[in-house]
Image: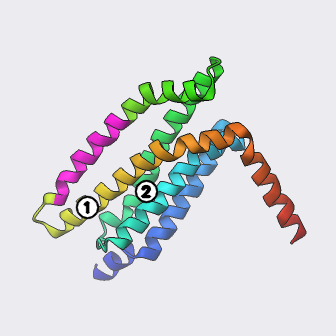
Amino acid sequence: SASAASALSSSARRLLTLLAGLVAVGLVLLAVFRKPRRALVPLIPIALATGWSALIVFAMRIPLNPMSATLGTLVIAISTEFSVLLSERFRQERALGHEFSVALRRTYSSTGLAVLASGITAIAGFGVLALSNITMLRDFGCVTLVDLTVSLAGVLLVLPAALEIAERGEFEEQIRGFQIGRAHV
């Protein structure tokens, strides 16, 4: 039992779980949207939030236990939900003919506020566990608090930049440059 708990809460296992989750989300988004750019835009804040969260938990030296070690997948799930909701709402606003800044403002003043409220509610709900006297629950609460906060902030702050880059067509240029670079190697 101790060996299984140790293996489950290892940093290496958490990293592999996160990478597998990101790949799975990327493939599902690509299958659903059928366009690499539409799949890549929401994936950028998801990947960044996942990495930031793991880095912050490591830097804060919050011990991982079998409960908290699997929370990286929660970051991916929450970030995916928020990122897809906001990016698709933005797409709808652009389809209505709104300029980039107007579409972004309309997206964040409607769907963005709902995402913010949902995120804060989840953070507060799980954050209460950080006050527990039981070590395992307290560590779980701390990791959840970090994970959800970084997830929400990552999507709200990074997604607009990803949308802007996508609007300028720079994703396609970078992908083509990567493919050409690999062909020469």
**Residue 18 to residue 153: above or below:** below
Q: Is residue 102 left or right of residue 174?
A: left
Res. 34 in view? no
Segment tinted magenta in the rendering:
116-130
- Neighbours of disc 1 within 10 Å: few (<14), some (14-19), many (20+): many
Residue at 51% x, 51% y: name it. 46
Q: CA distance from mark 2 to mark 1?
A: 16 Å
Q: Quadrant of residue 141?
A: bottom left
Q: Main secondary structure of the magenta part?
A: helix
**Residue drawn where x is 52% and y is 49% of the image:** 45
Is residue 155 magenta-colored?
no
The amino acid type, in three-letter code, at marker 2 is Thr
**Residue at coordinates 46% horizontally, 76% vertically from top-left?**
12
Most foreground residue, 175 or 109: 109
Q: Is residue 97 above or below residue 14?
A: above
- Residue 180 position, x and y percent, is 86, 60
What's the mark number on residue 142?
1
Residue receiving disc 2: 73
The answer to which image quadrant residue 64 occupies is bottom left
Question: Residue 14, located in which quarter of the rendered image?
Answer: bottom left
Residue lying farthest to the bottom in this orientation: 3
The picture places residue 44, in percent across and down from the top left corner, at 57, 50
Of all residues shown, which one is farthest toward the front? 101
Q: Earlier in the sequence, mark 2 or mark 1?
A: 2
Determine crowd level at label 2: few under 14, some 14-19, many 20+ residues with C-alpha closer than 10 A: some
Residue 99 percent location from the top left of the image: 63, 24
SS label for mark 1: helix
Amino acid type of the residue tagged 1 in the rendering: Cys
The way the protein has been coloured in the rendering is rainbow
Task: Classify residue 180 as left or right of residue 34.
Answer: right
> Mark 2 falls on what kind of element?
helix
